[in-house]
Amino acid sequence: MRKAIIDRQVKALAAHGLDAMVSCSPENFAYAAGFVVPSQPLIRHRHAMVIVTANARTELFAVDMEASTVKRRAPEIPTRIWAEFTDDAMLVLADQLKDLGLAKGRIGMEMDYLPAGDLLRLQAALPQACFEPCEHILARLRQIKTAEEIVLLRRLSRIADQAITDALAAVKAGDSEMDIAGHLTRNVYALGAEHFKLMIIATGERSSLPNVGPSERRLQARDVCRVEIFSVIDGYQAGVCRTAVVHEAPPKAEEIWAHLVDCKYQIMEMVKPGASCRAIYDAFIAKLSQMKLPPISFVGHGIGLHLHEDPYLGKTPILGRPGSDAVIEEGMVLGFEPLCYETGHGFGMQNKDMLLVAGSGSELLSDYANTDKLLVVES
């Protein structure tokens, strides 16, 4: 279990007048426990939860299929195990909450994750308890990273960056996008990631497509190549994207890239504690318009246990709250991505990095590749 995170949750419980908080999503289970229950993200009914009470008592709730994994990772934490095919998980959870003295408590639940039918059965089993949404509390806590989280995100950023850079260096004209994927996946694992998410490999005319995987398309001279991957350890992820050209750049590519590099440094200069997320986004859109490049809805976002987390450097800095703004704070980690999919010249370009908000400014975490110039795939 992660003491610093549990301590934060206990303080949040006091601030919101809650008696307990139940983290039931894979992301927030990992946030408190420090590990992912392997099948929980794959099979939604295999509930795994962390229960934290206002007096700092912590217990786990897990399915029998994953009991050995949970007990191995958190042997010192009391754990209630439910049987997948014979128990009603919500009735077992209700008994556990009763034993914690919460039969009449105010209990925070992740209402955006727990299925409605499960919540109804839990409420019926604990009719005197009051269940309230707590996902917004956990989302806010996760915006400011602990020292441990920053170390992990720094490592993940460099894994993703080097994996892409080395993969592009290993291919040549005539190789396929699948060949890039083969090198890239091997690199991610060889560099220490547990797995990866959202591998994007888009070359030539496909480089204007936002979220496509590798195809059998073969690299040709003057292709623009967009390659992105999220490396993952213990549920945390870092996303990096690099753009390369095969042998030499097509017309306008170097000019557009130089403009996106200027955008990158402008954002890095503006990202500091106290800065407005909306102001950074507006400055980016103004910079894009200088080359008559089309605007996008955001240029950066928080990242950690989700690919996208609040705050956004975009039109809506707080997700679901149009017209809102958010303030940059020390300890945030942002994925930021000056990009243009539709350049008007038959290709798209993207330069996605990981950025730590430090005490007086920002620090680039994905610092393996030098992206001031386009990377080159030799033909």
Image (spheres, rainbow, N blue to C red):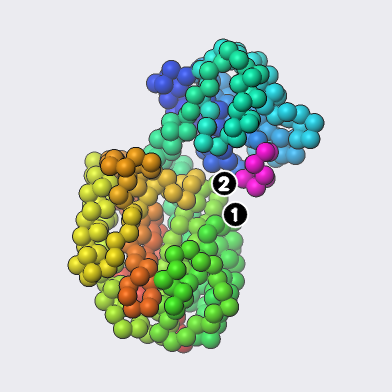
Residue beneath the point at 67% across and 38% down: 45
Q: Is residue 367 left or right of residue 178?
A: left
- The N terminus lies in which quarter of the figure? top right
Occupied quadrant, residue 179: bottom right
Kind of element beneath mark 2: loop
Q: What x and y, as percent, mark residue 189? A: 59, 61
Judge whether 103 appears above or below 363 on screen.
Answer: above
> Which residue does the numbered mark 2 point to in the structure image?
234
Task: Based on the picture, tell me whether residue 44 belongs to the magenta stretch.
Answer: yes
Kind of element beneath mark 1: loop
Judge whether 223 appears above or below 365 on screen.
Answer: below
Q: What x and y, as percent, mark residue 283? A: 21, 56
The magenta-colored residue range is 38-46
- Binning the other alpha carbons within 10 Å of mark 1 as few (below 14), some (14 to 19) or many (20 upward) gives few
Please say whether residue 218 is visible from this viewpoint: yes
SS assignment for the magenta stretch, majority: loop
Mark 1–mark 2 contact, CB under 8 Å? yes
Instruction: Please name the amino acid that badge 1 sits on.
Output: Glu
Q: Is residue 42 left or right of residue 16?
A: right
> Which residue does the numbered mark 1 point to in the structure image?
194
Occupied quadrant, residue 284: bottom left
Residue beneath the point at 63% across and 31% down: 117
Residue beneath the point at 64% across and 35% down: 48
Occupied quadrant, residue 69: top right
**Residue 233, numbered circle:** none
Q: What x and y, as percent, mark residue 122? A: 63, 23
